[in-house]
Image (spheres, helix red, strand yellow):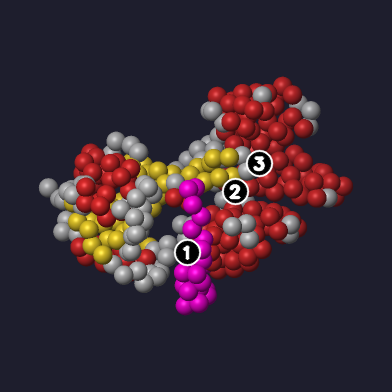
Amino acid sequence: MKTLSLVMIARNEAETLARCLDSVYSLVDEIILVDTGSTDNTKEIARSYHAKVFDYTWNQHFAEARNYALEQSTSDWNLILDADEYISNECGETIRQFINGGNAIGRIKRIDKFMDKNGEAYAQCYISRIFPKGIVYEGRIHEQVQSNLSRKKLSVEVQHDGYYMKVKSDRNIPLLKLELEADPSDPYYHYQIAKEYKAIENHNLAYVHLQKAYQLITRKEIYAPNVIVNFLYAIIAVGKLEEGLGLIEREREFLHDFADFHFASGVYYLDLILGNTEKYIGLLPLIEQAYLQCLEIGETDRYDSVIGTGSYASLHNLGVFYEVTGNETKSRICYQKAAALNYQPSIQRL
């Protein structure tokens, strides 16, 4: 029977650490926590769960800290979680079957909580977090597992609210700049720093880096679809609306089954028409088509995506479209369907 360690790095995580450890304590054989300089009682909380706690001098490099933590593990397999994450489904048997079934990288589903203009929102992504001993990370920030082993999606669901609770751009942007100084041609770090700038509403810099990421991607990257969608939103945010038409046309076939792309296109068409109604009023039917396409695709795990683009959020936006174009019957039907999924903006709209 293979053994499994939870391996963590943490600093001043007393607020959320117990929640994380409660969710995983019964699933692992060992807990390793490497503390990078806490001034609260993070280490005491960890020890109360019988964790092995190690001190590490923070050197502005996440992969090196994680790899030091992995070196302390004595198990056959390692599970990586952060303190602002916690397992939210029954998955013990799934994990045990996976680690006893041969070497591979386990990708778990993470649900990220964030704020948008309508309030609380959620996005989902699959991340490599369960792997055999000996595998390490690379990258100063947004570090990645380095391995040629195959990746397998697992029915393990983790909630993450760290970026909802506090903005981390002050920490992340300088580290991302260092990565870009080392390799300005890496689209991944242009994409990541753009997300940080978007979070602090510096849309101009977000646009600059997304434009660069878009120019550099090969479309084989797992994150390439999200670069394109975020670039379209950046185009909207900075008002370079003419650019969006070409982008949508170029990427329509590549992203034909990605609800987030069609959702962003619907948002874009509305802004374009409102910006120059006389010129673009003929594109009005494309708004309806975009959201209908989202609903046809539905919610899927095929991409890292915002939850709701294939269901309630598209129903709501379609309801708004029908309302302002005078089709009250269709509008009400859309709002009712979204409200049945507990989407608060539609409940309020009704």
Nearest-to-viewer mark from 2 and 1:
1
Residue at point 70% right, 33% down? 320
Gap in angstroms between the C-alphas marked 3 and 2: 9 Å
Residue 269 in picture, x, y percent from top left: 72, 47
SS class, disc 3: helix
Label 1: few (<14), some (14–19) or many (≥20) C-alpha neighbours in 10 Å: few
- Residue lying at 80% horizontally and 50% vertically, measured from the top left: 275
Q: How many marks?
A: 3
Real-space CA distance between mark 3 and mark 1, rounded to the nearest whole angstrom: 37 Å
Task: Measuring from the top left, give residue 231's x and y in whole percent.
Answer: 62, 58
Q: Position of residue 306 (x, y in %)?
A: 53, 44
| Residue type beneath disc 2 | Phe
Compared to residue 151, the image places residue 332 above or below, namely above
Q: Of marks 3 and 2, which one's residue comes earlier in the chain?
A: 2
Q: Which residues are magenta?
A: 164-189
As helix, strand or loop, the secondary structure at mark 2 comes to helix
According to the picture, the residue beneath numbered tag 1 turns out to be: 171
Residue wearing tag 3: 290
Q: Nearer the viewer, mark 3 or mark 1?
A: 1
Q: Amino acid at mark 1?
A: Arg
The residue lying toward the viewer, choosing from 182 and 148, is: 182
Question: Could you tell me if residue 293 is visible in this image?
Answer: no
- Along the polypeptide, which appears first: circle 2 or circle 1? 1
The residue singled out by tag 2 in the image is 261
